[in-house]
Amino acid sequence: MSSLFNTPYPPLFLAPMEGVADSRFRKAIAYIGGFDHACTEFLRVPTGGHVVSLAKRYDPNETAPIPQAAQIMGSDPELMGAMCLELAKRGAPRIDLNCGCPSNTVTGRGAGSSLLKDPELLYQVAKSMVDSVDIPVTAKLRSGFLDTSLFKENLMAAQESGIAFLTLHPRTKAEGYGPPANWDLIAEAKNLLKIPVVGNGDILNAKHALNMLNHTKCDGLMIGRGSVINPYIFWEIKACFEGSHYTRNIGDLLTFLTLFKSHFEADMRPKVRVNKLKQLVSFLFKANETLLEMRNNMLADTSSEDEYFCKVIKILKNHY
Ligand SMILES: Cc1cc2nc3c(=O)[nH]c(=O)nc-3n(C[C@H](O)[C@H](O)[C@H](O)COP(=O)(O)O)c2cc1C
């Protein structure tokens, strides 16, 4: 994994986003590319779960040739280790431990952000994962559960487990997505840890990416919502690193949308298909003021899937 950071510019990661950066989104954005590593949304590993069946939901090739890690969420060290073994057999290039998901149905069982309440358990889970496989294991943390009182303990527990690098989304579980991400905490993590730190939170354009690097000195950048609003963001950041300019090719965006739609399952109901397109529109139409003005109309539109898709394409061709 050190080779990932041994590059002229910091590596760029596509963030896991359950329900938004789903498999069809990841396959489509891989066509545009520009990121160096992708990751699935969290795969739950519930107590008593059957890891062989659970691991079958993971396909490492969705973003090929860009490597795609599997993210897992659970709190039983032995089971999480066994899950890693299955995922490695399926070709995972890296496995990421979710220490951030705020969902109550998940946190109720001690997984996700609940691990941040118990640095010792976080250590045990991560260590069992690291010890089970030869591929790199990483962890993605929020800055705390209710507050940041265990921030340093959690970072140290993660590092001591032997993980290859850590991603920090510097908001507590209690903060949700409310206040701005506290980039000072990424700088603090970078000062404290020996392993690479990937910074995440509120990067919406290339300038934000450079600002985060300057502010925190982090080793890599992870982008979530910004990549759904602007799927070219990774190329724009890379161009910025090189002091050049990336010229958007609208054809790529249209192919991205066509690919996204092509991955709808045959048995998906028409209403669900349109709603999936609307979810994407709700992000893409935040890209500029003109689109933002049209967003509400597009979200209220009741056209059929094909009509709706044609309208979206026409608007994006003229205004993206
Ligand atoms: C809809 C949604 C789903 C998310 N799902 C996950 C997830 O499955 N695993 C995870 O570690 N983080 C998840 N996150 C958090 C993101 O990976 C990221 O940390 C957060 O959005 C901040 O980064 P951003 O400002 O670049 O979006 C999710 C975020 C959103 C908005």
Image: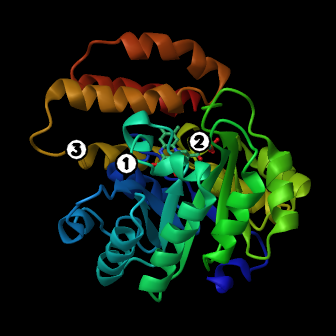
Q: Where in the figure is residue 174, as x and y percent of width and height?
A: 62, 32
Gap between marks 3 and 1 measured at Cα: 11 Å
Q: Amino acid at mark 3?
A: Phe
Which of the two marks, 2 or 1, is nearer to us in this view? 1
The residue that appears at 50% across and 66% down in the rendered structure is 96
Mark number, residue 223 = none
The crowd level at tag 1 (other Cα within 10 Å; few <14, some 14-19, many 20+) is some
Mark number, residue 230 = 2
Residue, disc 1: 22
Taking depth in this image into account, of 306 and 24 the one nearest to the observer is 24
Q: Is residue 254 left or right of residue 227?
A: left
Gap between marks 3 and 2 measured at Cα: 21 Å
Q: Secondary structure at mark 1?
A: loop
Q: Secondary structure at mark 2?
A: loop
The residue that appears at 17% across and 46% down in the rendered structure is 265
Gap between marks 2 and 1 measured at Cα: 16 Å
Q: Amino acid at mark 1?
A: Asp
Which of the two marks, 3 or 1, is nearer to us in this view? 1
Q: Which of the four quarters of the rendered structure image does ligand 1 lie in?
A: top right
Q: Where in the figure is residue 42, as x and y percent of width and height?
A: 41, 54
Where, quadrant-wise, is the C terminus in this rendering?
Answer: top right
Q: Please tell me how many numbered marks the rendered image carries.
A: 3
Q: Ligand 1: does it lie within 8 Å of the C-beta at label 1?
A: no
Q: Secondary structure at mark 3?
A: loop
| Mark 3 or mark 2: whose residue is earlier in sequence | 2
Q: Quadrant of residue 68?
A: bottom left
- Kindly check if marks 3 and 1 are in contact, taking CB atoms under 8 A apart as contact: no
Residue, disc 3: 264
Residue that lies at the very extreme toward the left in this rendered image? 267
